[in-house]
Image (cartoon, rainbow, N blue to C red):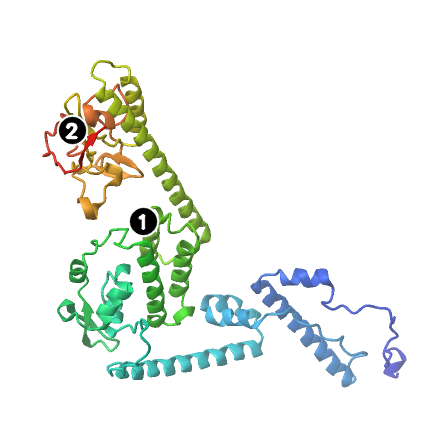
Amino acid sequence: MPRDRFYPTSQSLEDPQRAHRTHRNPILVEALKKLSLEARLKFNRDIEVKNEARRLKSIDHAMGNASRPGSPTASFVTVDSEEIALIRKEPAFLKRVFDYLGPWTINFIQDRNSSDKRKAEEDTEAKDVAAKKARLVPDIEEGSNDLPEINFPQILFDTAKRLPGGIPLSFFTYERLSAIASDTLLTQKIRVSFLDDDGKKSTVYALDVPKLIDEWKLPKSGDKKEGLSFSEFREAAGFLLKFEAERTIGGENSNNYRWLDNHFSFWLVDRSSESLFEFWKDLEFDQRMERKIYPKPFVTSSYENAWSKAENKKARSIEVKEILAAATAAAMSAVSSSSSSSSYPSAQKQMKKLTKFGGISTPFQAGSKGKRKTLAPCCLGCGKRGHRIDEHVDSTHGKFSWVTFVNAVACSPDRGNKPLCFAWNIRRECKGCDSLHVCSFCGKADHHAFSWTCKVLFTLPEVHDAT
């Protein structure tokens, strides 16, 4: 019996208004876009299997083994080139989705990875050639009388790479970079030995960082201010960025360069950066040091929190100075009133306010009844006259004898930074506050600071006639 009596051999009639099932529906397209990469790969693999079945059915139809051809093949969900690059560069992910990839995709990944490997080998050879040329001295390009750009010498790169501590930011001012680049520091070099890529011992010269710190009178390692003014910090940041671009693979596209660029830009672009410099510099230093230990990405929110801390520190500093001014005036009034104690409660009230800040000494008065002399204030940290503890600068006045000054508060360094009582250290008089009653010079409780039991009184010539 003829086969065509039961199976039609012509195409069926179709409704011309019937919509094709494609991915042109906006809602469907948006839903497909939101699928994860792994889900889209699996989705495409399922489509590929079904398309293959449709093609086989069309072949059967052409051979007379099927009544009608297979339906049109379905289109795939888009996987862009960046996602393909992610698949081929992440071995763990490639292994997880390997079964979802078609043969052409696998061949493409293998070809591209082989190409990348060849390019990396060629780049390595080019770097070896460049390293051999590095010993050549470049010619000097004469220009205008303007300050020339800094050409970083090889010793700077070797120091940054071979010394564990690296190079301090304070070395990157124009003046100090010029001194290094002029090669006048022959006695400030050290030899550093290391094993090269072939396992052979090699030696390079590096900067003797401690000697240069002493010669330039810079703060020792760990000083968060780094001996830099705001303008010097801005200049050093710019040169450090340029240096990082030259020494890091990837240049300005490297992760470390981008992090430093974001880091310095955050602290320098705001109009109030300079006025807040003394309050945020230590926070900026901590962020750079933390980056060396834990290379995490730049997170704007953590920087905004740090900026808020700097603003709060400035506000607290202003508050402390205002209270100090009021306390000083009240204390001077109390000392000068020999016949009446009416002003004493006012002084005591201001002293009580100062207890929470750790206290700062008031000016002393001396002289006859007709004419008094006001001695300069005396620092509760170092014992020197001429400045208060909140005005103390280590580089100018020396280190504190014992006390620490944290967030505008005089604290004990060995008792969890607990605040010290200001009034007790000046007059050994206090009506039971919660602060520590120990000497700010030595930390002992058997005497107060201005008893001068443990420290010689420094007298500086800041004395003037009181009117």
Residue 408 image offset from top left, x and y in percent: 30, 37
Q: Are marks 1 and 2 in contact (CB under 8 Å)?
A: no
* Real-space Cα separation, disc 1 to disc 2, in angstroms: 31 Å
Q: Would you place residue 318 above or below residue 234 in this image? A: above
Assign a secondary structure to mark 2.
helix
Number of the label disc, if any, that sits on residue 458: none
The local crowd at label 1, few if under 14, some if 14 to 19, many if 20 or more residues have their Cα within 10 Å, is: some
The local crowd at label 2, few if under 14, some if 14 to 19, many if 20 or more residues have their Cα within 10 Å, is: many
Q: Which residue shows up at 51% across the image and 72% down it?
A: 85
From the viewer's side, name the closer residue of 18 and 453.
453
Image position of 163 (left or right of 246): left
Residue type marked 1: Asp
From the viewer's side, name the closer residue of 21 and 159.
159
Residue type marked 2: Phe
Residue indicated by mark 2: 450
> The C terminus is located in which quarter?
top left
Residue indicated by mark 1: 282
From the viewer's side, name the closer residue of 30 and 246.
246
Image position of 49 (left or right of 300): right
> The N terminus is located in which quarter?
bottom right
